[in-house]
Amino acid sequence: MSTAINIGVGEASAVTDAGDEQLDKGVLNTSAIVFMVLAVSAPLAVVVALLPIALAFGNGAGVPGAFLLATAAMMLFAVGYVRQIPFVKNAGAFYAYISASVGRVIGLPAAYVAAVSYMALCVSTMSALAFFSGDLFTRATGIPTSWPLWAAINTVLIVTLAYHRITLVAKVLAFVLIAEVVAVMALNIAIMIRNGLPAFNPGDFSPSTVFAPGLGIALIYAFNSTIGFEGTAIY
């Protein structure tokens, strides 16, 4: 997918006159890209949706250790990933890197797998967004509504943001991300006030706890918490 598609129809002013489908320099600064990528990871969604599943079906108290392992792996990956970006100048992201290393025969199937996965993620995320939007509206007003209505409303909102300048999207995502982080920190503080510091057991990071049965499941959700990391390449 070309960068021009990713930046939206209304971003024509940010495309060079040469028609090479590249953003002009200065359209997005580093902080804007950081906010856009981190917003995709959705910290609040991780805490509300992924962590409970990891705790229930993973290695239990060892889940924080699983997140540390995933963080270490992603930091190692980030070094090589960022070093490759200047040498593989293609908006195809992972497809471009796989094709450059092992050829298009492997790169194309990988691209289709990624595309199907992203589509499934979009559908599931929109379904959840529509359900909770409708639930919030009903709780606030007492008026019952169906989730397809909120799916349509949210789709229109997303398309409207995508149509306008990418800098607008960056600002909106920055606001949302900051709000999510504040909410998560408020939850952390509330837990500390209620349970006290003794509730945080350093023994949860011991090898016997981290490498307990269910570590694989916990790692799956730990790595899922970093989704969107690969999006940096298209910028």
Image (cartoon, grey):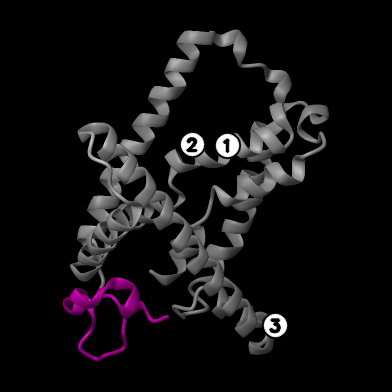
User: Residue at position x 63%, y 88% from top?
Assistant: 104
Instruction: Residue under label 1, please give it.
Output: 51
- From the top left corner, tell me how far across and down residue 41 is, in percent: 46, 50
Q: Which mark is residue 102?
A: 3
User: Residue 170 or 148: which is nearer the viewer?
Assistant: 148
In this rendering, is residue 65 above or below 227? above
**Mark 2 and 1 residues: CB-CB less than 8 Å, in contact?**
yes
Check if residue 224 falls in the magenta segment. Answer: no
Three-letter amino acid code of the residue under disc 3: Val
- From the top left corner, tell me how far across and down residue 149 is, in percent: 28, 56
Residue range corresponding to the magenta coloring: 1-24
- Looking at the rendered image, the quarter that the C terminus falls into is bottom left
- SS of the residue under disc 1: helix
Query: Toward which corner of the image does residue 24 lie, by quadrant?
Result: bottom left
Which one is closest to the eye, mark 1 or mark 3? 1
User: Residue at position x 34%, y 73% from top?
Assistant: 6
Of the image marks 1 and 3, the number of the one nearer the N terminus: 1
User: Residue 117 or 40: which is nearer the viewer?
Assistant: 117
* Residue that sits furthest to the bottom in the current view: 18
Of the image marks 2 and 3, the number of the one nearer the N terminus: 2
Say left or right for 116 vs 190: right
Instruction: Residue under label 2, please give it.
Output: 48
